[in-house]
Amino acid sequence: MGIKNYTSQQPVMRTIALIEVKLAVSGATQILKEYTPDGKVDSIAFIKRMNGFDMPFKLPAKISECEKILRSRIRKPRKDTMKRISQQAERTAWKLIFDWVDVQMTMIELNQAEFMQVFMPYLYDHSTKQTYFEKMKEKGLQKLLPALTEKA
């Protein structure tokens, strides 16, 4: 199976701007970019007001994970190839986030899903610096979802 967007040439900041537009149109009241020490955008955080509460969400790009996979597909990479792979991983990771957000917003608009139904894993707790999914994973999904792990 091929990797989606692994050849994307769209500049990262253009893709991020498109994500921000999708989030703003969906009702985000604040949007924040978080950067790595080397100046790359690491994640997009946003606030959406729901039922009278400001709900924080965080969408991480996981560029290094994308880069590992792309590097593993190259047999004998040259030094200049490794730099290009790093840049491609960043473009690919952000393009995937855009595509995912775009599809989710379309599903919400067509009443195929609710906002919290698709974005809940990305609900963000500032005090622990974790998404809801990260918290669940840390505590053990099986413990949190006993009905799903019970044997029939």
Image (cartoon, rainbow, N blue to C red):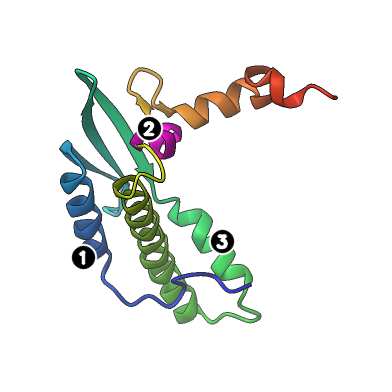
- How many residues crowd around disc 1 within 10 Å: few (fewer than 14), some, or many (20 or more)? few
Q: Position of residue 62 (x, y in %)?
A: 45, 50
Instruction: Say what amino acid the circle numbered 3 marks.
Output: Lys
Which residue is drawn at the image coordinates 39% and 37% (left, top)? 119
Q: Residue 68, how many percent across, how many down?
A: 56, 61
Labels 3 and 1: the sequence-earlier one: 1
Image quarter (top left, top right, bottom left or bottom right) of the C terminus = top right
Tell me which amino acid carries mark 1.
Arg
Query: Does residue 1 appear left or right of residue 6 in this picture?
Result: right
Position in image of residue 100 (x %, y %): 40, 55
- Which amino acid type corresponds to the residue marked 2 in the rendered image? Met
Q: Secondary structure at mark 2?
A: helix
Which residue bears the numbered disc 1? 14
Residue 62 magenta: no
Q: CA distance from mark 3 to mark 1?
A: 24 Å
Confirm whether the magenta stretch covers residue 119: yes
Q: Where are the magenta residues, as a range?
A: 115-122
Cα separation, mark 3 vs mark 2, equals 31 Å
Near-viewer residue (134 or 1): 1
For the residues labelled 1 and 2, the Cα–Cα distance comes to 26 Å
Q: Which quarter of the figure has residue 43?
A: top left
Q: Quadrant of residue 76?
A: bottom right
Q: Which label was assigned to residue 116?
A: 2
| Secondary structure type for disc 3 | helix
The residue that label 3 is drawn on is 68
Q: Which mark is in front, 3 or 1?
A: 1
Disc number placed over residue 145 in the picture, else none? none
Comes first in the chain, label 1 or label 2: 1
